[in-house]
């Protein structure tokens, strides 16, 4: 059974650019969540999607957005990149969220220069 | 605001030692508490706890939840160098949101 797949693994972008990250959940999982991990703030919740609908959103600016497709794959977009957006972005999939546990992907390491 | 606090933040032990990692929380709409091990990138799932007083075990690892006192512990017996990692505690609240603690960096020396 394939795990959670995130692409790309590494990314270097310049301030002001935008970036799109992709997450393919475990087959049959319909919930996808996104987290940002930095040394100073730890793991912080960005948003969660279920059946193409955003169900919950964390305290991040509107530059951070996402979407989910009918096959449950999800994308996260960050516009007008800032140096502080440099982080490991992790996605987690779950059969339906709440109470079923979450399996994480290996993440995308984003560096903004 | 939901809060999860882990202690200690860092721990260095020798192989064979037993360690106890702590996690306390203050959240609204508690659903479950989860423990993860993070070695390089992907946090890997260890336990999910929803009921007080019921110990979950997997090999040398065990965990228990106290919903009255709002804390959980993760025990690792007979530690091995392969146990070296960051151990993350997370609380799931309504809306499928996980709030994480800062993590405990465990180093097991041979």
Image: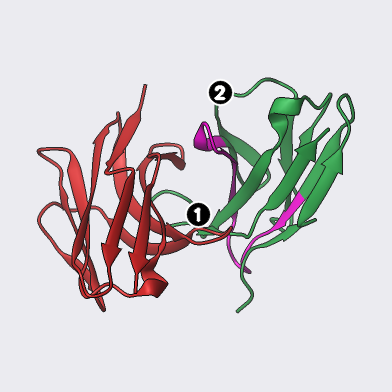
Of the residues tagged 1 and 2, which is closer to the observer? 2
In the image, what residue occupies the spot 35% across and 68% down?
A: B109
Disc 1 designates what residue? A96
Q: Quadrant of residue A57?
A: top right
Disc 2 designates what residue? A59
In the image, what residue occupies the spot 64% across and 39% down?
A: A53
Local packing at callout 1 (Cα closer than 10 Å; few below 14, some 14-19, many 20+) is some
A2 vs A9, left or right, is left
Quadrant, the N terminus of chain B: top left
x then y, percent, for residue B17: 20, 69
In the image, what residue occupies the spot 32% across and 35% down?
A: B4
Q: Earlier in the sequence, mark 1 or mark 2?
A: 2
What shade does chain A have?
green
Quadrant, the C terminus of chain B: bottom left
x then y, percent, for residue B91: 34, 42
User: Foreground: A27 or A103?
Assistant: A103
Q: Quadrant of residue A70?
A: bottom right
Query: Start and end of the magenta stretch?
Result: A22-45
User: Foreground: B76 or B99?
Assistant: B76
Magenta stretch: helix, strand or loop mostly: strand
Q: Is residue A43 visible?
A: yes
């Amino acid at each position: 059974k394939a795990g959670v797949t995130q692409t790309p693994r590494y990314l270097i972008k310049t301030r002001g650019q935008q970036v799109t990250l992709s997450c393919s959940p475990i087959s049959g999982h319909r919930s996808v969540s996104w987290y940002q991990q930095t040394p100073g703030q730890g793991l912080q919740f960005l948003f969660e999607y279920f059946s193409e609908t955003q169900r919950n959103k964390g305290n991040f600016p509107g530059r951070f957005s996402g979407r989910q497709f009918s096959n449950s794959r999800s994308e996260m977009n960050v516009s007008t990149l800032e140096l502080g957006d440099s982080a490991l972005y992790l996605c987690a999939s779950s059969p339906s969220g709440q109470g079923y546990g979450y399996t994480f992907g290996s993440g995308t390491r984003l560096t903004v220069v | 605001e939901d809060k999860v606090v882990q202690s200690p933040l860092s721990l260095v032990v020798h192989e064979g030692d037993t360690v106890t990692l702590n996690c306390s929380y203050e959240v609204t709409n508690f659903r479950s508490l989860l423990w993860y091990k993070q070695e390089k990138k992907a946090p890997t799932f260890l336990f999910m706890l929803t009921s007080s007083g019921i110990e979950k075990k997997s090999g040398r690892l065990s965990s228990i939840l106290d919903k009255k006192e709002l804390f959980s512990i993760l025990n690792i017996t007979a530690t091995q160098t392969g146990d070296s990692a960051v151990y993350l505690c997370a609380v799931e609240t309504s809306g499928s949101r996980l709030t994480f603690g800062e993590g405990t960096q465990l180093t097991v020396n041979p």
